Amino acid sequence: MRLEGPKKLMWLLMLFSVGICVYMLYYAANTFGEPYRSFSSPDGQYQVMVYPKRQQEWTMTMPGQGGDVPGIVRLCKTEGGHCLKQQRVEMVRIVDWVSWATTNVHINALGDWNLPR
C-alpha cells in the first residue's frame, strides 16, 4: 500500500502531532520550578535545595496545596553549584529541616547523605 497526496500528508501530520504530545508529556514530567526551600551548611560549602515539580496549566490544586507537589532534593556545592546527590520526594513539604555534621547531612524523611572530603 502506497500513500500518495492527501493521505500521505494526513499521516505525516498525525505522526508529527503524536511526536509533539510525547515531547510535552516528557517535558511536563521532568521539569522543576524555582527552589521551594534551601538549607546552607554552617561553613557555607554545601546547600540542600528542594525543587518542586513544575505545575502545568492543566493540573488542578486546591488553595494551600502548594507543598503537596512531588519534587527533587539536591545536595550541591555552593561554589560552582555542582550537584553531588539528588533524590525524588513525593511531597516537597516533608523536607522541612536538615542537620549538618562534619561528614554528613541528615535530611528529614530522606536520611543521612555523606559529604565529600
Image: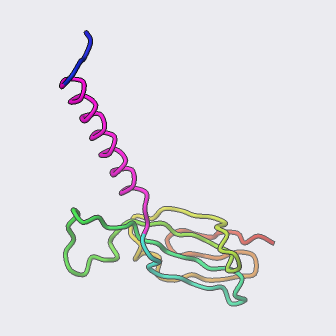
Give residue 70's position: percent from left, percent from top: 38, 65
Give residue 72's position: percent from left, percent from top: 48, 66
Q: Is residue 66 left or right of residue 92?
A: left
Residue, far front: 5
Residue, far top: 1
Q: Nearer the viewer, residue 99 or 21?
A: 21
Image quadrant where residue 2 sits: top left
Asked if residue 18 lies in the magenta stretch, the reply is yes
Screen quadrant of the N terminus: top left
Residue at 27 percent across and 76 percent down: it is 65
Residue at 43 percent across and 62 percent down: it is 31
Residue at 20 percent across and 30 percent down: it is 10
Residue at 37 percent across and 47 percent down: it is 23
Give residue 105's position: percent from left, percent from top: 65, 76
**Which segment is the magenta one?**
6-32
Asked if residue 53 lies in the magenta stretch, the reply is no
